[in-house]
Amino acid sequence: EVQLVESGGGLVQPGRSLRLSCAASGFTFDDYAMHWVRQAPGKGLEWVSGISWNSGSIGYADSVKGRFTISRDNAKNSLYLQMNSLRAEDTALYYCAKDLYPRIAAAGTFDYWGQGTLVTVSS
Amino acid sequence: QSALTQPASVSGSPGQSITISCTGTSSDVGSYNLVSWYQQHPGKAPKLMIYEVSKRPSGVSNRFSGSKSGNTASLTISGLQAEDEADYYCCSYAGSSTSQFGGGTKLTVL
């Protein structure tokens, strides 16, 4: 059974940093691209970032480019999101999501999702 | 990057069919057949319903279908059931390892 478990969320002041983690199990992690998708309270889904199976292709939404960094450790079956210079508008539930297609760049089709970790940016 | 455009809400009676549109640009929906649709019930994670414009994952009812014409993709739900009431989101690959979601559509089953 595929499982994605996010952690690392919490309350943080504007301008500070936070690192999210996603622990994956139940599939061959290093075969698949992975993504972060967020959802602000009461709002829609927003794709944040994606990383290919071998970290060779990485993409970011314009809203986080230059502030967030996605990475993965295939030996640890883990996905990360380093979030710097956080803003109030980054407040959201952050989901880790698995891409559907093996061994290609991040194609943006998400077949499994975690339950999310809540990030609140407030002073 | 601009969000794909979806109607904010649609409604239908049980047994009827509804269609949700998703309009993008020639840089996303119009350029790639990597359009997917997600169903999200309150407090739950999204669920993949349609991928590659019109394909259904195993376990998804054949009442759900997808299509695309030009820069607009569509999700059709036939034989509406009470459990279909949820938020629906389209998503398209937009090149350079980026993706874009629509703003979401709230489906109400009357």
Image (cartoon, rainbow, N blue to C red):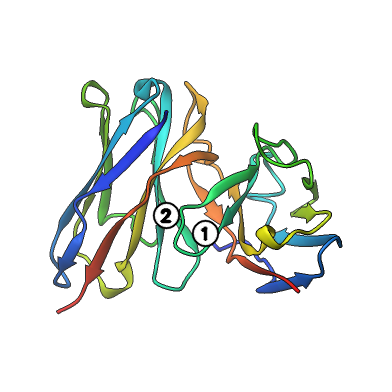
Local SS, label 1: loop
Residue at 54%, 60% in the rendered image: B41
Mark 2 in CB contact with mark 1 (< 8 angstroms)? yes
Image coordinates of residue A96 in percent, x first then y, are 37, 45
> Taking A14 as reference, is B93 above or below it?
above
Image coordinates of residue B18 in percent, x first then y, are 81, 62
Image coordinates of residue A75 in percent, x first then y, are 22, 21
- A118 horizontally vs B87: left or right: left
Image coordinates of residue B12 in percent, x first then y, are 80, 69
Q: As shown in the figure, which amino acid type bears the numbered disc 2? A: Ala
Question: In this figure, which residue is indicated by the disc labeled 2?
Answer: A61
Local SS, label 2: loop
Question: Quarter-wise, where is residue B21 in the image?
Answer: bottom right
Question: In this figure, which residue is indicated by the disc labeled 1?
Answer: B1
Q: Please state, as top left, top right, bottom left or bottom right, where the C terminus of chain A lies in the image.
A: bottom left
Q: Name the chain letter of the residue that bears numbered label 1.
A: B
> Taking A16 as reference, is A107 above or below it?
above
Q: Nearer the viewer, residue B48 or A59?
A: B48
Residue at 66%, 64% in the rendered image: B85
Q: Please state, as top left, top right, bottom left or bottom right, where the N terminus of chain A lies in the image.
A: top left
> Taking B37 as reference, is B55 above or below it?
above
Residue at 65%, 35% in the rendered image: B59
Q: Name the chain letter of the residue that bears numbered label 2.
A: A
Q: Nearer the viewer, residue B7 or B43?
A: B43
**Badge count:** 2
Q: Is residue A58 visible?
A: no
